[in-house]
Image: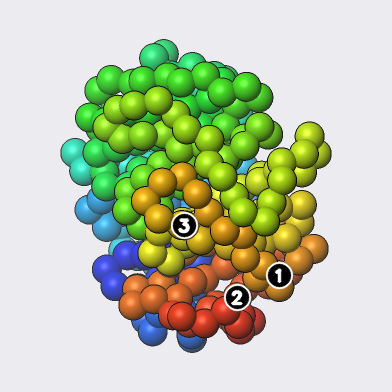
Amino acid sequence: MGLAGVDGRLLCLSRSGEVSVSSDGGARWTSRGRSAGGKALFLTAVPGGRLFAGTEKDLLFSRDGGLAWTSIPLPEGTVFTSLAGTAGGELFAGTAGSGLYRSSDGWSWQKVDEVQGARVHSLRSSDGTVIAAGTDAGFSVSLDGGLSWKNEEVIYGILSLAFDGQGRLWGASRTGLWNFPLPEGEIMEAEVAGFRWLPLEYFTDIFQGEGSSLYALLGGEAVRLVPEGEGASFTLQRTGLSNTMILAALPVPGGGMLLATSNGFFMSSAGEKAWTEIELP
């Protein structure tokens, strides 16, 4: 499942392949029909207004905001689980066992050998120049649109990545929440007030939230991580959304948040802690 913003509109791709669009910040949605392919894995908007959707069968591409889709065959034996694009038009795609791939046109793909790790758990770009991959080996980060890469090993790897509203890069692992300093420096473990790391209790997914906050999945509960000061310190806030999985998240222009979960689609307005369930077509 995925959420993306394109040309002032919000788009949602359900796991079954239904495409919906909202022009009012997520309060109301209309259907744009179904995409082709199998079960939807992600939806990504890249610079230039292009949309890419990954399925268990192929990669889908749209130039018109999700009205029409073109199927792109994948390299043999691979399934793309995430995708990010650069301002220069380059595309990067993560896999669940074959490492990271790159393409200049979306059709021809080559393995990125400089990136360590076979499983790319998460792939993010903040501005079309900085590209970050969270792999089973740790962080792999490029500051120049994918021309060169820096690898930082983390025990058990990085499960999920998120850039906050200030462009800072965070990674969640079984050993903690880590900050990868940009443009340079040593990775730093974050402190989260109200939470203690345990071998079987850790953040499995993190997402960009409003401002400099993050949203995270902790043992089936969606929580909000609110920054304290300028360092790597957070306070944990409960959202009331439990027994769930966060499938996608997107800050809403003008404030607020959209969360697509296994239990439904929820929205919060700017400055409010309450969540409203939103019906999709």
Vertical position of residue 130 compared to residue 27: above or below: above
Three-letter amino acid code at disc 2?
A: Phe
User: Can you identify the residue that label 3 sits on?
Assistant: 227
Secondary structure under tag 1 reads strand
Say whether marks 2 and 1 touch (CB < 8 Å): yes
The one nearer the camera, 120 or 73, is 120
Name the side, left or right, on which 109 lies relative to 234.
left
Give how far apart the Cα atoms at labels 2 and 3 are.
Answer: 23 Å
User: Can you identify the residue that label 2 sits on?
Assistant: 266
Q: Residues within 10 Å of mark 2 (few under 14, many from 20)?
A: many
The one nearer the camera, 70 or 166, is 166
Please indicate, yes or no, whether residue 202 appears anywhere in the rendered image: yes
Name the quadrant of the N terminus.
Answer: bottom right
Residue 215, given in percent of the width and then of the height, sits at 56, 58
Between disc 2 and disc 3, the foreground one is: 3
Residue 249, given in percent of the width and then of the height, sits at 52, 61
Give how far apart the Cα atoms at labels 1 and 3 are.
Answer: 20 Å
